[in-house]
Amino acid sequence: MTKLTELLGCKHPVILGAMGVICNPELVAAVSEAGGFGLLATAFTSDAEFLRKQIKDTKELTQNPFGANLQVMNPLTSELINILADEGVKAVTVSGGSPKTIIPLLKDKGMKIIPVVPTVDVARKSEALGVDAIIAEGSESGGIQGFRGASTMVLVPAVVDAVNVPVIAAGGIADSRGYRAALALGAAGVQVGTRFIATKECIAHQNYKNAVIDLNESSTQLINLGAFRVRALSTPFAEKLLSDPSQTGGGFSGQGIEESWLKGDMDAGFLPAGEVTGLIKDIPSVKDIIDEMIQ
Ligand SMILES: Cc1cc2nc3c(=O)[nH]c(=O)nc-3n(C[C@H](O)[C@H](O)[C@H](O)COP(=O)(O)O)c2cc1C
């Protein structure tokens, strides 16, 4: 089996989880500079050329490799793939559905394909499509989820037993303890989201970062948004929706995200975060986190 670091061309098997608009080039580059693998996120990208700009901005900050996340539901996906290939990006994670329809395009461009999966069944189906590695994302993870899932502790070894490609553990990993636990479960590496929100390089608003460090391990909720669920901080905004789901409103729209994640209006939208928020107590640099993790 190819080592994950060889597959991605990085020093440490630590991937920055895609996190929408807060995967800013400074954060992505900082992860790659620290020896991990930064990922640009395109789930909310509505202008393909914006991705080209983000790639160029990231390249100004690091010469190390980085990748991108594709959400199969984004109607711009084919265009985004062409831009990624033009700009020399060599690996993508794929979430939000089966990568089946875009695999021929990605293979044609010679890109490594790493789907994010919530179950053993989806992991097996993905492997059969010829993917290069699999991210097993446990249900304690921050962000969007489906309606079936299992925690990282159960999902990762179950997926490791079921497939022959490298498995990357996601969900609940914030430090060297989580990293070592993931390796002990058979993972070849980790994907980390929430821990990287509370970093100096992340563009998330200070209110979002403070909420991540102030709240505890039971301060997140899975909120049903109809087509999917999102694990987010239990802010008054989220609590209101739990008691009256008809008020979903624009909390997960582009505008709600901009106002809450970037401008710090805690009443404008959800603030996705994982249960691991209970282990995050400070706002260090990305390098400090990765150095401690892989020590
Ligand atoms: C704010 C936020 C936004 C996210 N957006 C995406 C996304 O656009 N695409 C994706 O595949 N995963 C997304 N995720 C999931 C992460 O990439 C990662 O798998 C997850 O955060 C790992 O769990 P952790 O939060 O416990 O570290 C998001 C997570 C967070 C916290």
Image: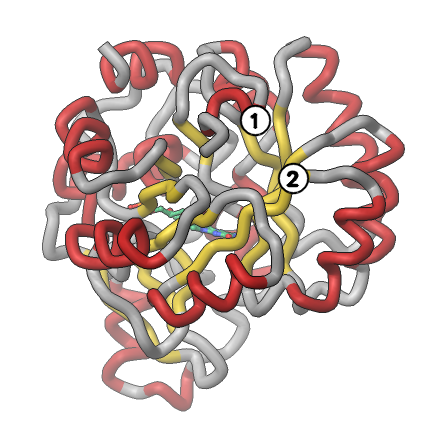
Q: Which residue is mark 1?
A: 8
- Which callout, 1 or 2, points at the residue further toward the start of the chain? 1
Q: Is residue 191 visible?
A: yes
Residue 283 position, x and y percent, is 29, 22
Disc 1 residue type (three-letter): Leu
Specify the label residue 226 is tagged with.
none
- Mark 1 crowd level (few <14, some 14–19, many ≥20, 10 Å Cα): many
Residue 108 position, x and y percent, is 84, 47
- Give the quarter of the image for residue 250: bottom right
Asked if the residue at tag 2 contacts the one at tag 1, i.e. Cβ–Cβ closer than 8 Å, the answer is yes
Q: Which residue is mark 2?
A: 112
Q: Quadrant of the C terminus?
A: top left
Disc 2 residue type (three-letter): Lys
Q: On the picture, is 32 further left or further right than 51?
A: left
Residue 174 position, x and y percent, is 24, 32
Q: On the picture, is 111 further left or further right than 246?
A: right
